[in-house]
Image (spheres, rainbow, N blue to C red):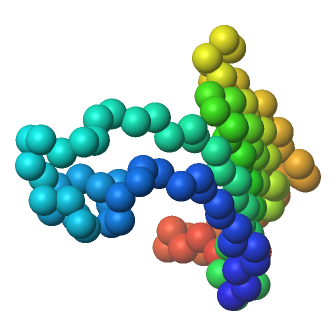
Amino acid sequence: MTIKGTRASAGYIGGYAGYGGYGGYGGNDGYAGDDHGDYYAYPKYAFDYSVKDPHTGDHKTQWETRDGDVVKGAYSLAEPDGTTRIVEYTADKHNGFNAVVKRIGHAHHPQVYNNHDDGYYGYH
């Protein structure tokens, strides 16, 4: 199995050590008098990955980016019928979530032959 491309990046959140500076998680004792209020971390990231496993036939990819409230991405996967499904999507606060689904290739299914009277079905 081959896994390609794992990339991720995220912005720095908070000014305390540990998990964002909340009490009990690194450096902050959680006293009511502590000087930390709500903060806004601007959401921005990008990632992608792919899997190509010839043994199982598992072939898929995905990528996604986010910059504030705008998300763009796509994923593809090999369907059991031999086609490839590709989904491209976007999301933002004005248009909501929108996806375009494509299917590439021609579906093929095994032919079934009934050559026996005992109900046995052979696949070709």
Residue in view at x 69 percent, y 59 percent: 47
Q: Quadrant of residue 52?
A: bottom right
Image position of 105 (left or right of 75)? right
Q: Quadrant of the C terminus?
A: bottom right
Image position of 116 (left or right of 25)? right
Q: Position of residue 69 (x, y in %)?
A: 62, 28
Residue in view at x 54 percent, y 73 percent: 120
Q: Residue 96, can we see it? A: yes
Q: Relative to residue 77, is residue 118 depicted above or below?
A: below
Residue in view at x 12 percent, y 41 percent: 33
Q: Quadrant of residue 116?
A: bottom right
Q: Residue 113, can we see it? A: no
Q: Nearer the viewer, residue 36 or 56?
A: 36
Q: Relative to residue 124, is residue 25 depicted above or below?
A: above
Q: Position of residue 119 (x, y in %)?
A: 51, 68
Residue in view at x 35 percent, y 58 percent: 16
